[in-house]
Amino acid sequence: MSLCLDNVGYATGGTRLIKDINLEIDNASITVLIGPNGAGKTTLLRTVSGELVPDSGNILLDSDNIADIELEQRAKRIAFLTQQSVLDFPFKGHEVIQMGRIPHLTGREHNHEVVRAVTDACQLQDLSERTFTTLSGGEQQRIQIGRILCQVWDQMEAAWILFDEPTSALDLAHQLVFFKVVKSLVQRGASIILVLHDINLAARFADNIVLMSDGRILASGPPSAVINSDNIQEAFSVEIDLIKSEGIERPMIQARVPL
Amino acid sequence: MALTGSASEVQRIIVTDIRFPRTLLAILVGSGIAACGASIQGLFRNPLADPALIGVSSGAALFAAGYLVLGANLSGQIGLTTSAFIGGLLTTWLVLEVGRRGGTISALLLAGVAINALAIAGIGLLSYLSTDVQLRSVAFWALGSLNGADWQSVLTALVIPAVILLLFRERHNLNAITLGDREASYLGITVPKLRIRIVVLTALAVAVGVSLTGVIAFIGLIVPHLIRLTIGSTHQVVIPASALLGGLLLLIADTFSRTLFSPAELPVGILTALIGGPFFILMIIRQKGKLGI
């Protein structure tokens, strides 16, 4: 059981957004994509989701070619939180969360149970009766995360969950809630791929990190193998120092900034 | 005795052949416009979309008027409704395409404004070409009135509840599409097909309504908005509740339009526009910054 990208490339409007992507991701793991703006992280997620069809190579999801999986079936196996979901209608929080159940014909009662379980796990009780359009950016993001989890909640062992910058608007406490929930999902067999900008956060929570630059994979593997000053310098053109912090074995970095 | 007998006979005819079908037609057309408004708003992801505002109704009216003026020898409700349907379909499709190319919701609404203006200009042009008798009918479509209600029109309007049922079947898909086209496709929905289904269904109901009563604006805007404010936003609630309230509201508006300046009758389209216009302005002001414009 894995996700396998074989020589995947995608171009649009004459621009090659990703190229030569070879990657194998085990299931029940956390993979974090990092890299500078425009490196192709979102494009990679969109090809993995099956939305963009690569113009070279192919993507195998548990040995099925992703292009051959029907849209409705795909929605039961892959959940994808995009960066720019805009919702202009005054839905209640729990109504948005419940939209994650749309691909499933599991009945009203079961769906309500799933919504309740997700609400508890993600600590969304305070938001579930509030009107979505009146929530802050971070609160809306938390609800949307709930919706994504709702989509695959009862079949985590077969689920691939893609998050594009899920914590961009979250405060520190809710970032930690998010990663705690993600960890628990992985224990239930879920496979998680996230785009993150915070390299230290990525290094702490990832099983594997994929460092992208200019549409290619620059390095991939466990955090200790990817996060070093040469790789970061090459991808971001920023000089860093590795720092030590008590009780944290994962690599941590600090940008060398003349102050 | 004979006199009272014939008077009650007249009353009976007024009730059964004029008032009763008119009441039913008001309910049917009002429910159709409101349910279509709700569905179009979901599809366009904009609470300000309205079949009349974005030009669907005018497009249908233009084709209905064109049928009447240019094909003067042809007659019959079916030809008229079919023309209106083609007009409604064409304008909805045009608005969606232009709006999609523009890429934003404001492009979509502006496309609707432009197409609406074109259709109204077309109706104006037709009125120059028409005979006096035709002119009255053309004016009727531009204003909207339930004046022509009879049992035949009620029968034609039975298409509308069927359309509402079919729109109700799309309730979960419409909820999903408010999240965005891409988000809906991640939820397993084939968006282009859904779009075609909603466009065809709404164009059909709007066309039937327009061919029977002319353009009645703002019911499709106000009613779903009130439902979202008071009852809820999910389409399993908005579609049926809008249909109920839309039917009721048009019935009330029509009653006022008949009696307000009695014995003269105000076209109900004027009344709904007089109430709906200010309401629309209020919505714009209250939603400031949240319209995506």
Image (cartoon, coloured by chain):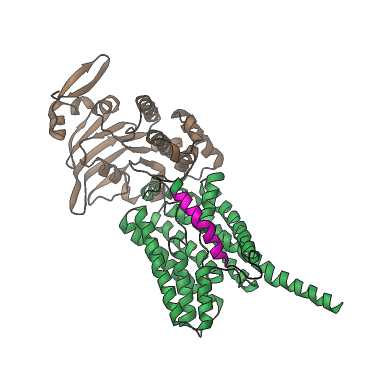
Chain colours: A brown, B green
How far across and how far down the image is residue A214, in percent? Answer: 16, 41
- Quadrant for the N terminus of chain A in the image: top left
Above or below: residue A83 compared with residue A56: above
Q: Is residue A253 magenta?
A: no
Residue stretch rendered in magenta on the structure: B262-284
Residue under the point 52% across and 52% down: B224
Above or below: residue A23 compared with residue B105: above
Q: Nearer the viewer, residue A249 or B1?
A: B1
Q: Nearer the viewer, residue A158 or A219?
A: A219
Residue under the point 51% across and 71% down: B141
How far across and how far down the image is residue B290, in percent? Answer: 40, 45
Residue under the point 41% across and 68% down: B90
Please tell me whether the stretch drawn in magenta is mainly helix, strand or loop: helix
Quarter of the rendering containing residue B144: bottom right
Left or right, residue B155 beside residue A176: right
- Residue B38 seen by the camera: no
In this view, the residue farthest toward the front is B261
How far across and how far down the image is residue B70, in percent? Answer: 45, 82
- Residue B159 seen by the camera: yes
How far across and how far down the image is residue A81, in percent? Answer: 36, 40
Q: Is residue B282 magenta?
A: yes
Q: Nearer the viewer, residue A93 or B130?
A: B130
- Quadrant for the C terminus of chain A in the image: top left
